[in-house]
């Protein structure tokens, strides 16, 4: 099967698996008390964790690939 | 609000005092960690194919996935079950189990990290994972690893956020009693903390817990089994009950490990009065039924595979029934179920904590055995294209390097527990409990940092 641009996997991940995440974010914005500072703080932490994962992998991966042949 | 008697002084004790036994344990785990690093350097230096029993896709034959991917499936199951316990405490107010919620949370974070590490071990080098992330939009169509990475990253970010947010008000209230050398870390956790935010953070945490609980069946009973069932449909990797079976196994091993860690903390810090026997007995009942469910799903596999199954599934089932590992797994499950129901029905005769820990360990190892068999068997008999075109029927036996690296991930998780015990309180303290720890004349020197 040729690789299509839009595949069933994308519908599964973004249409079904991520549903609880969308509902969670809606709950944060619609639920009381309304406090957008805390929501922004939560997104901030999430971004920091994503950044730490990606940058950490990049640094460790690059270091190891420079040091070893495999 | 709670009926649980928590003594905050004793919860903070591990952060303030360190016993001789702790140092001995830390030394042993450090030695194991060094052995792990040595084996990893060896694998990186000579290549995965050269030092493991794993064959390369299309080159050397044999199974391309082995103990590492079996270990990945096991760790990810442990992670999902661990956080399910913690999230359930928050979502449905199971306040009785609050004393074990953070132990389960920490287990989840460590298990997710170990799941990711197993993928790194299987792929050979961490930069390949980085490449998979960069290539994700293009590989998500066909790469199971792209899905793995998406699942692990999503879960890791959600659970880390959950843990950090739940620590903000707590750390800020008891900071004067925490180790001073960790001040930068505590400053990061409590960044911009304001007591007015507590109510909203609680609401955010509740929704986070709801999302995490909903994701458990979607990921552990969905994406992970789908990863296998959608790849070339190998025999043994698909079936109507595959998702439910994997979810049951995952939660069984997770609960077994939560039980073990709970008992370890109770014993090590004398928390028997805070984590009561009652909690252990309740968890025993749940574990008994989960283990029974695992046996039931195994019967599904055997019966449907043995009785007029298509040729390839029939051959795989027949092969599985001849494997010693299969019967060791069945033995482990049956023995565990008998003992667990004995503990429930005749607690005076059967219920004792060391036996419960033993049964929990037996179950966790049995499920690991099943997961590795599940991964390897489908690949040993490539009966469906495109795998038939890639490599011939193979054999698989993990090498010493694989064993050291996989067991090393268990040691690393233990090491992680030892470290985290010295960084955050392992039982969540509620407002009224934190009040009891308010700074006194001697302690308020660091207050307000």
Image (tube, coloured by chain):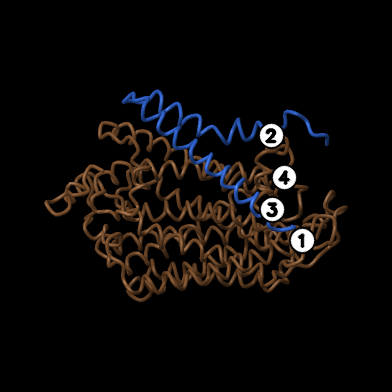
Chain colours: A blue, B brown
Q: Are marks 4 and 3 in contact (CB under 8 Å)?
A: no
Q: Which residue lies furthest to the left in this view?
A: B441
Q: Element at badge 2?
A: helix
Q: Element at badge 1?
A: loop
The CA span between labels 1 and 3 is 29 Å
**Residue B213 rendering spot, x and y as whole percentages:** 46, 42
Tell me, yes or no, whether dots 4 and 2 are on the same chain. yes
The CA span between labels 1 and 2 is 28 Å
Tell me, yes or no, whether dots 4 and 1 are on the same chain. yes
At x 76%, y 58%, the residue is B64
Q: Which of marks 4 and 1 is in front?
A: 1
Q: Name the residue under label 3.
A: A66
Q: How crowded is mark 4: few (under 14 residues within 10 Å), some or many (20 or more)?
A: some
**Residue B220 rendering spot, x and y as whole percentages:** 56, 48
Tell me, yes or no, whether dots 4 and 3 are on the same chain. no
The CA span between labels 4 and 1 is 18 Å
Residue B63, numbered label: 1
Residue B234, numbered label: none
Instruction: Tell me which label, 4 or 2, sits earlier in the chain.
Output: 2
Q: Element at badge 3?
A: helix
Q: Residue furthest front?
A: A66
Compared with B183, B21 (above or below) is below
The CA span between labels 4 and 3 is 36 Å
Quadrant where the C terminus of chain B lies?
top left
Q: Do the residues labelled 4 and 1 touch (CB within 8 Å)?
A: no
At x 38%, y 34%, the residue is B204
Q: Name the residue under label 2.
A: B137
Q: Element at badge 4?
A: loop
Q: Which of marks 4 and 2 is in front?
A: 2
Q: Mark 4 points at which residue?
A: B230
| Residue B219, quarter of picture | top right
């Amino acid at each position: 099967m040729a690789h299509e641009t839009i595949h069933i996997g994308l519908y599964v991940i973004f249409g079904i698996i991520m549903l609880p995440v969308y509902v969670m974010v809606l709950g944060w914005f619609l639920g009381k008390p309304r406090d957008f500072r805390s929501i922004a703080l939560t997104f901030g932490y999430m971004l920091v964790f994503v950044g730490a994962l990606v940058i950490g992998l990049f640094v460790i991966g690059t270091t190891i690939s420079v040091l070893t042949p495999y | 609000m709670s009926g649980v008697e928590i003594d905050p002084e004793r919860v903070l004790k591990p952060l303030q005092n360190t016993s001789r036994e702790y140092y001995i344990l830390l030394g042993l785990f450090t030695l194991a960690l060094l052995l792990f690093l040595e084996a990893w350097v060896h694998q990186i230096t000579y290549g995965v194919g050269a030092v493991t029993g794993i064959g390369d896709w299309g080159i050397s034959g044999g199974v391309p996935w082995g103990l590492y991917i079996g270990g990945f499936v096991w760790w990810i199951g442990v992670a999902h079950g661990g956080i399910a316990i913690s999230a359930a405490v928050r979502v449905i107010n199971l306040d009785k189990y609050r004393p074990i919620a953070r132990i389960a949370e920490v287990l989840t974070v460590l298990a997710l990290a170990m799941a990711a590490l197993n993928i790194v071990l299987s792929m050979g080098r961490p930069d390949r994972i980085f490449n998979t992330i960069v290539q994700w939009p293009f590989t998500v169509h066909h790469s199971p690893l792209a899905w793995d990475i998406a699942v692990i990253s999503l879960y890791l970010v959600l659970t880390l956020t959950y843990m950090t947010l739940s620590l903000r008000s707590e750390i800020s209230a008891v900071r004067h009693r925490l180790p001073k050398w960790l001040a930068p870390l505590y400053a990061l956790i409590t960044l911009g903390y304001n007591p007015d935010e507590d109510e909203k953070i609680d609401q955010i945490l509740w929704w986070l817990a709801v999302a995490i609980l909903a994701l458990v069946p979607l990921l552990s009973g969905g994406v992970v089994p789908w990863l296998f069932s959608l790849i070339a449909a190998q025999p043994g990797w698909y079936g109507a009950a595959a998702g439910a079976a994997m979810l049951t196994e995952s939660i069984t091993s997770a609960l077994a490990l939560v039980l073990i860690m709970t008992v370890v903390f109770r014993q090590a810090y004398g928390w028997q009065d805070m984590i009561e026997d009652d909690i252990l007995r309740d968890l025993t009942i749940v574990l008994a039924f989960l283990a029974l469910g695992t046996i039931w799903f195994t019967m599904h596999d055997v019966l449907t595979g043995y009785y007029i199954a298509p040729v390839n599934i029939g051959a795989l089932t027949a092969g599985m029934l001849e494997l010693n590992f299969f019967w060791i797994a069945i033995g482990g499950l049956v023995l565990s179920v008998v003992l667990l129901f004995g503990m429930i029905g005749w607690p005076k005769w059967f219920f004792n904590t060391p036996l419960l820990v033993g049964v929990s360990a037996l179950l966790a190892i049995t499920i690991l055995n099943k997961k590795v068999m599940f991964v390897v068997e489908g690949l040993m008999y490539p009966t469906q294209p495109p795998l038939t075109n890639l490599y011939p029927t193979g054999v698989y036996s993990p090498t010493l390097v694989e064993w050291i690296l996989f067991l090393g991930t268990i040691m690393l998780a233990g090491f992680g527990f030892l470290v985290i015990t010295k960084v955050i309180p392992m039982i969540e303290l509620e407002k009224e409990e934190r009040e009891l720890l308010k700074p006194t004349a001697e302690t308020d020197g660091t207050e307000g940092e």
